[in-house]
Image: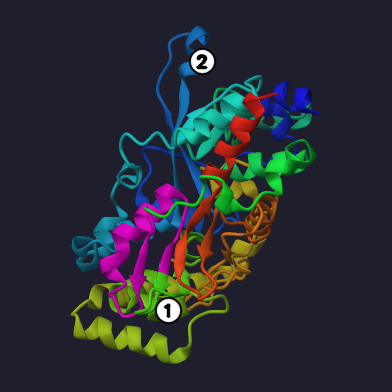
Amino acid sequence: MAASLLACEVSDLCLGKPALRSISISATVADALSIVTRIDEGYISVWSCGDHSSKDDLELHCRCVGKVCMVDILCFLCRQENLLQPAIALRSPISVLIPDGLGLVRHLEPHASLMEAIDLILDGVHKLVIPIKMSTSKRKKYFLMKASSNSVSALHNDREYCWLGAEDIIRYLLNSIGIFSSTAAAPINSMDIIDRNNILAVNYDESALSILPLISQALIHQSSVAIVDFDEKLIGEISPFTLNFSDETVVAAIATLTAGELMAYIDCGGPPEDLVQLVKERLEEKNLDAVLEWVEEESSTVSSSSSSICSSSDDEFGSGSGSGSGSCSGRSGKIGGYSARVVRRSEAIVCYPWNSLVAVMIQALSHRVCYVWVIQEDGTLAGTVTFASMLAVFRDRLKCF
């Protein structure tokens, strides 16, 4: 079994994976927003496609240069200058949402080994972009679209691609957990995987706007922002995962609420009506009338167009690519919109230092998060365990086989 893992290629992990939704690097923030609010994946891939003079240049013609999600858009729109003129901010190029020099996405050929993929994830890559096979009928359909001057092909380099991330690799390794039995059964405090130094935590009463840099860091480090009381006990979190399935009206909440209030606002099921009213009052107090007008306009647009969104097909997304039917986002049609797809609440996912590695793996996978908070018996925050730190352990064990 160990030999089969060492011989595994990344294409083995791509079976059944949907093709990427995509958008051009020449698009605007508004274009990205219109797509991320209508899809289930959470992220869209950003592609740069230049002119090429010959078929020999085809492989270099299109490259995935980044990924964008709702949290990227929220953090951008909540900058002070953009709060004053949100309509102008939305016309900014999508490139403003992609951090420079981080290399969060990387192309990888399908014959690359599992070990290569793990090494790239440990180097800080979030998503590996892998070519996938298409059926003959689907390929013919896209070639016909490409031949039409009025259609935009969803292919890049005449191929479809999928994402692979740390979650996919952890899930794959879990299927072979037997060969790691002694390591998997060991408590996490017996191995060097609890990060005690890079904890992102704030008090309940801190301004939500002031913690935006921490939310951006959490997105990059694939973790979350803990909400703690004055005794450093964990009482909840503001997770990029939860924010990712909110909508643009959360900009108003971030601009006006405390961290604790925002935690309640983004909780599954939509915000309490008193918080919605509080957001409106504080927007007026801060002279952010432009934000209030914009989010109310956006909310009414979502409400009136929800039926057409639910019936739309993949091809109607324009710059998107992928398989599966169009979906209704379940927005509420008012300030405080949320996605009915989210089943998590703002209650933090926690474990204890004496829990086993495999138990923490299963806990993270079952809640679809890339991290688990580690707390002491009295509830105080001790650190985090991430998929990346778990992969480092499995990487070391695989090197011993």
- Looking at the picture, tell me which residue is in the foreground, 383 or 61: 383
Q: Which disc, if any, is residue 58?
A: 2
Count the labels in the image: 2
Q: Classify residue 302 as left or right of residue 328.
A: left
Q: Position of residue 197 (x, y in %)?
A: 37, 53
Q: Which disc, if any, is residue 356?
A: none
Q: Position of residue 20 (x, y in %)?
A: 59, 40
Bounds of the magenta span? 198-226
Q: Is residue 252 visible?
A: yes
Mark found first going from the N terminus, 2 or 1: 2
At 62% from the left and 21% from the top, the residue drawn is 112
Q: Find residue 265 and report its image quarter.
A: bottom left
* Magenta span contains residue 227: no
Q: Position of residue 329 (x, y in %)?
A: 59, 65
Label 1, secondary structure: give it: loop
- Looking at the picture, tell me which residue is in the foreground, 166 or 56: 166
Q: Residue furthest bottom?
A: 274
* Magenta span contains residue 217: yes
Q: Quadrant of the N terminus?
A: top right
Residue 318 in the image: above or below residue 213: above
How far apart are the alpha carbons under marks 2 and 1? 46 Å
Residue at label 1? Answer: 335
Q: Classify residue 41 as left or right of residue 366.
A: left
Residue 204 in the image: above or below residue 34: below
Label 2, secondary structure: give it: helix
- Looking at the picture, tell me which residue is in the foreground, 35 or 183: 183
Q: Say what amino acid the circle numbered 1 marks.
A: Ile
